[in-house]
Image: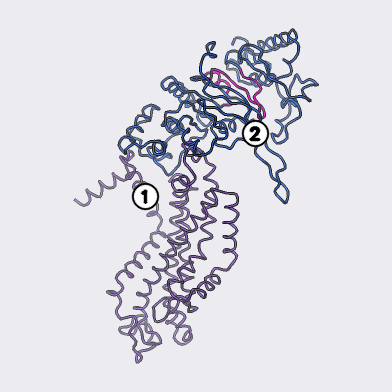
Amino acid sequence: MTTETSEGLRAWLLTETPHSRWQARMGSFYQGWLTLRGNPMAMFGIAILVLLLLLAAFAPLIAPHDPFAQDLSNRLKPLGTAGHMLGTDSLGRDILSRLIHGSRITLYIVALVALIAPIAGLLVGTVSGYLGGWVDLVLMRVTDIFLAFPRLVLALAFVAALGAGIENAVLAISLTAWPPYARIARAETLTIRNSDYISAVRLQGAGPLRIITKHIWPLCISSLIVRVTLDMAGIILAAAGLGFLGLGAQPPSPEWGAMISEGRRFILDHWWVATMPGLAIFTVSLAFNLLGDGLRDVLDPKDGSQ
Amino acid sequence: MLDMSDARKLVEIRGLKMHFPIFSGLLRRQSGAVKAVDDVSFTIYEGETLGLVGESGCGKSTCGRAVLRLYDVTEGSIRIDGVEIAQADPAQLRGLRPTMQMVFQDPQASLNPRMTLASIIGEPLDEHTKLGKAEKLNRVYELMDAVGLNRAFAHRYPHEFSGGQRQRIGIARALALQPKFIVCDEPIAALDVSIQAQVVNLLEKLQDEFGLTYLFISHDLSMVRHIADRVAVMYLGKIVETAPREALYAAPAHPYTRALLSAVPEPDPRREARKDRIILKGDVPSPANPPKGCNFCTRCPEVMEICREAEPDTFEVTPGQFVACHLYAQTNSEQTAGQAAATEAHKSIQQGD
């Protein structure tokens, strides 16, 4: 019964003659998924990220301890201690529980930045590329100014001005992350705006607003998605960096960067306190990079038809 | 052909200029202009096909695009269906768009790769009509029938089609708003020879069916001979000769037209061997720096003193045949003699036609 319906769904998705626009769109998504599925590294990345999502969603159920519960008699226990698989930190808090709860913060930051930065970049880039002239000149010079700062230093300056905290960290990282997206979107727009199908749309009487929103955005989005997934690792690292410098999430919140920062004091005698959150950052960053590489193979419009 | 003067003028172009500025130097000052289209005038009557021919880079595509106001023209007048559009603002143009449409050269590049066929063809309908979803799909189906596309393909993406099919999609899109005037910008240049005939026949069929008027831009002289009623020959941004098809192919008046026609391949090898071609020497001058006098004076086999000094006026050598050449500026007797010689020369080139 289930195999029958899944067969039916498959046939519906792969049909040569879709009956609606929606079916055609779903079909091309499915084609992309099939290509992605053939890439084991990307699938590995997806598996890690799905695991991370589940951990974050069910953190209170999965975590063996309260991430904030201190137990000073049990501080700095090594790996494999009964009841504390990954040991405890300087205040006797269970590291595993803190890592699991910390995944929520990481995902929160990544998701918000991944929404804000590309959208801002897309807006600036497409408007600049399509309108050209003075608009282009001004917007691109602003972009250049942002690009001229080292990312973390600029984020630091913003956080210092806005005040420490996760929301401000998100804002600061977004502010430093949008210029590359604007550059990409502008480059794409420049090639798209001179193409014949844009001429055809202009011949139908469409104005700049309609052309940008209905034709240029959809075509820019796939290269932005690839760039975002490849950037996720950078975002996580920037967030962790801010946390490490004490300007991101504030203690006692179990943010991974802040955890490394706390563990730094004991790094020679109690290496696991700093290493475990470091490993978590490494694994998630790697997963995003693998997924990004796989997505590029699927989505890159320069590859032509799928 | 003779009742052409009675027909209504649908498109009237007078003194059209399309110059693209060149900026150079530190201050990006305008130092010159590429005169892609320089003082071009022609008329297209309702229901006819005007072929616009010329070699690559002579400005024929730019001319076609400027006529539809895809560019902001530098100077001149464009009247389509009685409305002056050369300096019309975007809002005004928008209302006029349904009258005039275009079929593009590269069918791959003229279709948005992320849109299904139905949304591509239906898009002009979104823009200019208030049809419901079902009505719109019906209209799309009608258009697909008209250009010979299977209705079952309506929700496929452009990359799933062959070149000829894609060109049909482009034609269906151009037809969606029931235009009167269509600019065909080398619509067959990117297609296989076997498909070219299909597309040209389709264009002719649609012309009969919907009473369309075409500006058919091409460098394929044989195809233009097949489809066009009148032909305009362009060289370096200017129209050098306009004539009814028969007159032009039988007795080309301008030296450039003669050279162009002598380059058409001859299918019969024996005749091909006897054919003496007029080989032009040198390259086309840059449109940013055209020669003084007649644009063709650097390569013309019959160049005279005056050609290097003054631009030629346009003369009507036979009814309907207009030539911009100093050869025809002489006294009447000389003119007819010159023309006879030209005709004679040409007969030996294209015997049997």
Q: Nearer the viewer, residue A235 or B231?
A: B231
Instruction: Check disc 2 and give the amino acid type.
Output: Ala
Residue B176 rendering spot, x and y as whole percentages: 41, 31
Side of A74 where A131 appears, left or right = right
The answer to if B12 sits in the magenta stretch is no
Q: Which residue is mark 2?
A: B36
Q: How far separated are the C-alphas under marks 1 and 2?
A: 44 Å
Residue A39 rendering spot, x and y as whole percentages: 41, 56
Residue A225 rendering spot, x and y as whole percentages: 44, 56
Instruction: Check disc 1 and give the amino acid type.
Output: Phe
Looking at the rendering, which quadrant does residue B216 occupy?
top right
Segment colored magenta: B218-242
Query: Can you tell which mark lies on residue B69?
Result: none
Query: What color does chain B have in the rendering?
Result: blue
Residue B111 rendering spot, x and y as whole percentages: 46, 38
Pointer 1 local density, CA inside 10 Å: few below 14, some 14–19, many at least 20: some
Same chain under badges 1 and 2? The reply is no
Query: Can you tell which mark lies on residue A29?
Result: 1
Q: At 71% from the left edge and 24% from the top edge, which residue is drawn?
A: B280
Query: What color does chain A have in the rendering?
Result: purple
Side of B93 where A55 appears, left or right = left
Of the two numbered discs 1 and 2 in the rendering, the one whose residue sits closer to the viewer: 2
Pointer 2 local density, CA inside 10 Å: few below 14, some 14–19, many at least 20: many
Residue located farthest toward the left when viewing the structure as drawn = A1
Looking at the rendering, which quadrant does residue A295 occupy?
bottom left
Q: How many numbered marks are there? A: 2
In the image, residue A65 above or below residue B233: below
In the image, residue B49 above or below residue A37: above
Provide the chain ID for the residue under circle 1.
Answer: A
In the image, residue A105 above or below residue B287: below
